[in-house]
Image: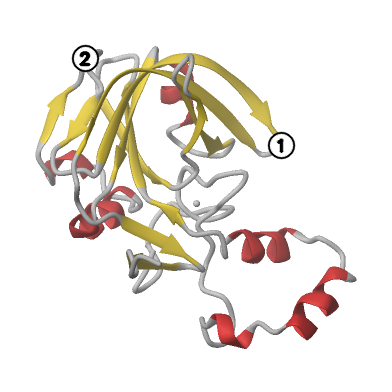
């Protein structure tokens, strides 16, 4: 859990830095990115094939997600952030959310040692920020309007929603680390969200 083009940068596994266990940002699929091209015959044939990492990534990429920039402060107090779509709700009472990060991530140690983190849910107008924080840029925070949150982790202005969290628990799950945070502060705005589906960024479609 990139698009109108594929996001660039540290996209591994499913393809944002914080690629999810359940809904990764996958690379563009071969052939037309069109649900009309996926017939029942194809689905039935796929069911008999082995579950490979590539097939799993492609199938999970069919699950549409929002896009976030997740931030924290490292042990030296420096700002750390990355693009991820592995964010999800866990519990209303107590207020818990979760996300996951691949074991090979260069930012993993910072989040493992952090006592808090912030999930900045991006608006459609913040597509460039998503790409910036999925890149190899060292000065990622030079772009955007940032301010410290309640525990110091960076909060991005103009987001659809912001969840400021204290670290509740973390555990290794397969090739990722699962982070669970307790929400201590939040904000939201009625803005169009940025959406990711099948290897591409999208805007929100019509209400059905």
Name the residue rendered at 18%, 58% in the picture.
125
Residues under labels 1 and 2: Cα distance?
32 Å
- Decide if residue 41 is on the left or right side of residue 186: right
Instruction: Report the residue at 39% width, 64% height from top.
Output: 2
User: In the rendered view, would you say 139 is above or below 15?
Assistant: above
Position of the C terminus, as image quadrant, is: bottom left
Q: Is residue 124 left or right of residue 18?
A: left
* Badge 1: residue crowd in 10 Å (few <14, some 14–19, many ≥20): few
Disc 1: which residue: 174
Residue 175 quadrant: top right
Q: Quadrant of residue 7?
A: bottom left
| Of callouts 1 and 2, the N-terminal one | 2
- Which one is in front, 78 or 26? 26
Instruction: Give residue 150's mark.
Output: 2
Q: Provide residue 14's location: percent of width, then percent of height.
A: 56, 55
Question: In the figure, 112 relative to 14: above or below?
Answer: above
At label 2, counting other C-alpha atoms closer than 10 Å, the crowd grade (few under 14, some 14-19, many 20 or more) is: some
Q: Residue at x 53, y 53 (%)?
A: 12
């Amino acid at each position: 859990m990139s698009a109108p083009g594929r996001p660039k940068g540290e996209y591994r596994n499913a393809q944002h830095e914080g690629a999810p266990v359940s809904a990764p940002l996958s690379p563009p699929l071969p052939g037309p990115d069109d649900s009309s091209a996926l017939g029942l015959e194809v689905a039935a044939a796929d069911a008999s094939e082995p579950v490979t990492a590539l097939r799993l990534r492609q199938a999970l990429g069919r699950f549409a997600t929002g896009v976030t920039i997740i931030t924290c402060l490292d042990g030296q107090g420096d700002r750390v952030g990355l693009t991820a779509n592995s964010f999800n709700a866990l519990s209303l009472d107590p207020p818990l959310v979760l996300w996951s990060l691949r074991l090979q991530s260069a930012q993993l140690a910072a989040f493992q040692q952090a006592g808090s983190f912030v999930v900045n849910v991006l608006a459609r107008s913040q597509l460039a920020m998503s790409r910036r924080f999925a890149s190899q840029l060292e000065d990622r925070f030079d772009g955007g309007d940032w301010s410290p949150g309640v525990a110091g982790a960076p909060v991005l202005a103009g987001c659809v929603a912001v969840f400021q969290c204290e670290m509740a628990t973390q555990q290794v799950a397969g090739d990722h680390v699962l982070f669970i945070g307790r929400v201590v502060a939040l904000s939201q705005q009625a803005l169009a969200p940025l959406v990711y589906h099948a290897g591409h960024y999208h805007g929100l479609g019509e209400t059905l």
